[in-house]
Amino acid sequence: MIILDTDILVNILRRKNRGEQWKDFLKDKSIAFTTITAFELFLGAEISKKYDHNMKAVKSLIQQFPVLPLSIKSSYIAATIYSDLQKKGQLIELNDIYIAAVTLEHGAELATDNVNHYQRVSQLKIINI
Protein backbone atom coordinates (compact mmCIF):
# COMPACT_ATOMS: atom_id res chain seq x y z
CA MET A 1 0.00 0.00 0.00
CA ILE A 2 1.10 3.54 -0.73
CA ILE A 3 0.12 6.34 1.62
CA LEU A 4 -0.06 9.75 0.01
CA ASP A 5 1.41 12.80 1.71
CA THR A 6 -0.64 15.97 1.66
CA ASP A 7 1.63 17.69 -0.87
CA ILE A 8 0.89 15.02 -3.48
CA LEU A 9 -2.88 15.34 -3.05
CA VAL A 10 -2.76 19.15 -3.13
CA ASN A 11 -0.83 19.06 -6.41
CA ILE A 12 -3.28 16.54 -7.87
CA LEU A 13 -6.29 18.61 -6.77
CA ARG A 14 -4.78 21.86 -8.07
CA ARG A 15 -3.53 20.19 -11.24
CA LYS A 16 -0.16 21.85 -10.79
CA ASN A 17 3.50 21.04 -10.33
CA ARG A 18 3.84 17.29 -10.67
CA GLY A 19 0.21 16.44 -9.96
CA GLU A 20 -0.41 14.80 -13.34
CA GLN A 21 2.80 12.75 -13.09
CA TRP A 22 1.77 11.49 -9.67
CA LYS A 23 -1.75 10.76 -10.88
CA ASP A 24 -0.36 8.64 -13.74
CA PHE A 25 2.13 6.87 -11.46
CA LEU A 26 -0.53 6.03 -8.85
CA LYS A 27 -3.01 4.63 -11.35
CA ASP A 28 -3.88 1.01 -10.50
CA LYS A 29 -1.97 1.09 -7.20
CA SER A 30 -3.38 0.48 -3.73
CA ILE A 31 -3.40 3.93 -2.12
CA ALA A 32 -4.68 5.55 1.03
CA PHE A 33 -4.02 8.63 3.10
CA THR A 34 -4.23 9.56 6.76
CA THR A 35 -6.68 11.47 8.91
CA ILE A 36 -3.88 14.00 9.38
CA THR A 37 -3.79 14.58 5.63
CA ALA A 38 -7.59 14.84 5.64
CA PHE A 39 -7.30 17.53 8.33
CA GLU A 40 -4.70 19.44 6.31
CA LEU A 41 -6.87 19.27 3.18
CA PHE A 42 -9.97 20.42 5.06
CA LEU A 43 -8.00 23.25 6.65
CA GLY A 44 -6.70 24.36 3.27
CA ALA A 45 -10.24 24.43 1.89
CA GLU A 46 -11.56 26.28 4.97
CA ILE A 47 -9.10 29.14 4.65
CA SER A 48 -9.04 29.34 0.85
CA LYS A 49 -10.64 32.04 -1.24
CA LYS A 50 -12.39 29.32 -3.26
CA TYR A 51 -14.04 27.65 -0.27
CA ASP A 52 -17.00 26.02 -2.05
CA HIS A 53 -14.95 24.65 -4.93
CA ASN A 54 -12.11 23.38 -2.74
CA MET A 55 -14.32 21.87 -0.05
CA LYS A 56 -16.30 19.98 -2.66
CA ALA A 57 -13.07 18.61 -4.16
CA VAL A 58 -11.72 17.54 -0.76
CA LYS A 59 -14.98 15.82 0.23
CA SER A 60 -15.06 13.98 -3.08
CA LEU A 61 -11.45 12.86 -2.72
CA ILE A 62 -11.94 11.60 0.83
CA GLN A 63 -14.79 9.35 -0.28
CA GLN A 64 -12.66 7.69 -2.97
CA PHE A 65 -9.85 6.24 -0.85
CA PRO A 66 -9.27 4.64 2.53
CA VAL A 67 -8.35 7.15 5.24
CA LEU A 68 -6.17 5.65 7.97
CA PRO A 69 -6.42 7.04 11.52
CA LEU A 70 -3.77 7.96 14.04
CA SER A 71 -4.25 4.93 16.31
CA ILE A 72 -2.80 4.18 19.73
CA LYS A 73 -0.05 2.14 18.05
CA SER A 74 0.81 4.91 15.58
CA SER A 75 0.72 7.42 18.46
CA TYR A 76 3.43 5.38 20.18
CA ILE A 77 5.42 5.19 16.93
CA ALA A 78 5.06 8.97 16.54
CA ALA A 79 6.38 9.53 20.06
CA THR A 80 9.45 7.42 19.33
CA ILE A 81 10.04 9.23 16.03
CA TYR A 82 9.73 12.61 17.75
CA SER A 83 12.10 11.59 20.55
CA ASP A 84 14.67 10.22 18.10
CA LEU A 85 14.57 13.30 15.87
CA GLN A 86 14.70 15.67 18.84
CA LYS A 87 17.82 13.93 20.18
CA LYS A 88 19.46 14.35 16.77
CA GLY A 89 18.36 17.99 16.49
CA GLN A 90 16.44 17.12 13.30
CA LEU A 91 12.79 17.67 14.19
CA ILE A 92 10.23 17.90 11.43
CA GLU A 93 6.65 19.19 11.54
CA LEU A 94 4.47 17.29 13.99
CA ASN A 95 1.87 16.48 11.32
CA ASP A 96 4.63 14.91 9.22
CA ILE A 97 5.65 12.78 12.20
CA TYR A 98 2.04 11.58 12.55
CA ILE A 99 1.83 10.76 8.84
CA ALA A 100 5.13 8.86 9.01
CA ALA A 101 3.93 6.94 12.07
CA VAL A 102 0.69 5.82 10.42
CA THR A 103 2.69 4.77 7.36
CA LEU A 104 5.07 2.71 9.49
CA GLU A 105 2.21 1.15 11.45
CA HIS A 106 0.69 -0.16 8.24
CA GLY A 107 4.00 -1.28 6.72
CA ALA A 108 3.28 1.01 3.79
CA GLU A 109 5.35 3.32 1.62
CA LEU A 110 4.93 7.10 1.71
CA ALA A 111 4.57 8.97 -1.58
CA THR A 112 5.85 12.51 -1.11
CA ASP A 113 7.75 15.35 -2.73
CA ASN A 114 8.89 16.38 0.76
CA VAL A 115 11.79 13.92 0.79
CA ASN A 116 14.16 16.11 2.84
CA HIS A 117 11.97 15.92 5.94
CA TYR A 118 10.78 12.36 5.71
CA GLN A 119 14.19 10.81 4.99
CA ARG A 120 15.10 11.70 8.58
CA VAL A 121 12.63 9.07 9.80
CA SER A 122 14.48 5.78 9.97
CA GLN A 123 12.82 2.73 8.43
CA LEU A 124 10.32 4.88 6.50
CA LYS A 125 10.06 3.77 2.88
CA ILE A 126 9.67 6.82 0.63
CA ILE A 127 8.45 6.96 -2.95
CA ASN A 128 9.37 9.98 -5.03
CA ILE A 129 9.03 9.94 -8.79
Image (cartoon, rainbow, N blue to C red):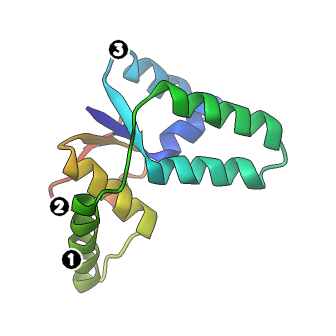
Residue 28: which disc? Answer: 3
Mark 1: secondary structure: helix
Query: Of circles 2 and 3, which is in front?
Result: 3
**Picture coordinates of residue 24, whole percent (x, y):** 44, 18
Q: CA distance from mark 2 to mark 1?
A: 9 Å
In the rendered image, the residue lying farthest to the front is 72
Q: What's under tag 3, amino acid-wise?
A: Asp
User: Which residue was labeled with disc 2?
Assistant: 122
User: Which residue was labeled with disc 1?
Assistant: 84
Q: What's under tag 1, amino acid-wise?
A: Asp
Please name whichever residue, 11 or 100, is drawn nearer the observer in this view of the structure. Answer: 100
Image quadrant where residue 120 sits: bottom left
Q: Is residue 105 above or below residue 83?
A: above
Please name whichever residue, 45 or 92, is drawn nearer the observer in this view of the structure. Answer: 45
Residue 17: which disc? Answer: none
Say which label, 3 or 1, has the lower sequence index. 3
